[in-house]
Image: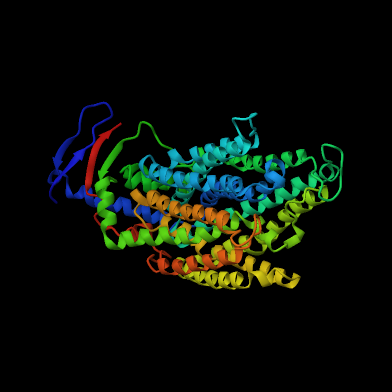
Amino acid sequence: MTGTVSYAADEGCGSSADVPLSTLGREDSIVLNSRRRAALAEIDQADFSWFHVKVCMVAGVGFFTDAYDIFGIGIAATMLGYCYGPNGVLTNAQDLGIKVATPVGTLIGQLLFGWLGDVFGRKRMYGIELMIIIIATFGQALAGSGLRAVNIIGVLVVWRFIMGVGIGGDYPLSAVISSEFSSTRIRGRMMTAVFANQGWGQLTASIIALIVVTAYKKQVLHSVAPGGATGPGIVTDTEWVDYMWRLLIGFGCVPGAVALYFRLTIPETPRFTMDVERNVHQAAQDVEDFLTMGTYYVDPDAVVQRVQAPRASRYDFGAYFARRENWLLLVGTAYSWFALDIAFYGLGLNTPIVLEAIHFGGATLGDLSPQAVYGTLRNLAVGNIILSVAGLVPGYWATFLLIDRWGRKPIQLMGFIVLAVLFIVMGSAFDKLRETEPGTKAFVFLYCLANFFMNFGPNTTTFIVPGEAFPTRYRSTAHGISAASGKLGAIIAQVGFANLKDIGGGPNSNHFLGHLLQILAFFMLTGVGSTLLIKETKQKTLEDLSNERQDSFVGGVSGAIRP
């Protein structure tokens, strides 16, 4: 062993000094590497325990809240249209603003918190993003407008952007925490169980919408125009709808507030403590504590021993990802997520538009009679519940059952191929299918099938693979980059829907929707190509997947030993 290593100085106690590596005893490296491997083996071979359940619940409630807040706006936008839109419908610019603000914020949050999670630790960042979500959600529910200078849609755009930053932080942190605490044989199912809460969040948003609409049924049906006139086509007083969207959005604070304490008290992952903080002794103790007692304790007076190990830096980051297999893997995870989110968010945030376009449930946007307002909101809520129960939620759990048997890559490949076929069929036959009731039912079936294979396919696997395939010091950053690429796709999809859906027809005609579905098919085909760049992570340890040597990962003692 040659070269030098820097001894980290005690805090406030002078500068570091370079010491030749030859002065470090060979037994230091051997013992420390052996201890590191033993601690990692305990994690990788651990039986499923209550601690794993706790991790799934603490991480999963974040995704429940994220999905509720993201996709609840699809129904809330219709309510906002009745309250603040011209002729009872938001303009394309207003609709685009409140829907695209969250993905823009999410993209920034994923990059920012992904990096912070690798610099300061998973634990120190976990909970901060949830606070941002809670505050921003509460702010939306209480949003108002001024006489001229402040418009409520603008206020909502700002709050939803801030909320998106918090949601973005949840992706890399929850992914790496669940992967780094999990044993190898159940890692895929554990990460899927966390991510599957996204489906429950979407379903709950629809259920809460239905409850709120039903609760205000009497008030809406008995509302009248300011002048007292009633009847079909008469503009009615929509003050009760204003209560509805505020309750619908505001409920998103509840699960986040419940989970906040557990987020703030979850232990740091032993892998971060070991490989980034380079404190093998503390990491080994943490493993023993949470595997046997389900808790952890950091003794402030304990000896802190820093070891020599690869350290994150611009140079090291560049050197690692300059290797062909590593940057191709990052391209594969990032583009696969990009292609998937074009379809997932393009449809997910515009489900009410699609339902209205095929006349599913008799939606009547633009008719402001009391019966039409109530009927439209109720039908949209019921329609979203049907789509969630028939496609979204079952898809996650199909992945849960097979992810550790089939593997990530086959499921993602299958999902992209099936989605490409479904979008071609739906897009090509869109106009004919919506002309008849049997055709409408056939379209809804195909739409549910597409939702199923998004989640039993790339929507789940694109979340899992980047949380496994990179070394600990860059795992959160790489996941954040991959996830942010997905949100870039979501932004493009939302802008595309807003500006292309009416091509060839009048405002809100949705004349181009069929061709938009065909465009989604193209992106699914490109996702097939990017899937070939990722590697299979099934039943492999995170260290084996890191593409780095593990037998001599620790070079010896590198830091001061201090009480």
Q: Residue at x 52, y 44 (%)?
A: 164
How many numbered marks appear? 0
Q: Residue at x 53, y 37 (%)?
A: 132
Q: Quadrant of residue 203?
A: bottom right
Residue 245: give x, y in percent of width and height. 69, 42
Residue 219: give x, y in percent of width and height. 83, 41
The answer to whether residue 477 is left or right of residue 361 is left
71 vs 304: above or below: below
Q: Depth check: 440 or 283 in front?
A: 440
Residue 446: give x, y in percent of width and height. 64, 69
Res 294 visible: no
Instruction: Check the image and tell me how it is coloured.
Output: rainbow
Residue 376: give x, y in percent of width and height. 75, 53
The answer to whether residue 237 is left or right of residue 129 is right
Q: Residue at x 75, y 48 (%)?
A: 211
458 vs 270: above or below: below
The answer to whether residue 20 is left or right of residue 381 is left
Res 545 visible: yes
Q: Depth check: 441 or 178 in front?
A: 441
**Where is the C terminus found, in terms of image quarters?**
top left
Q: Residue at x 74, y 72 (%)?
A: 438
Q: Depth check: 58 or 149 in front?
A: 149
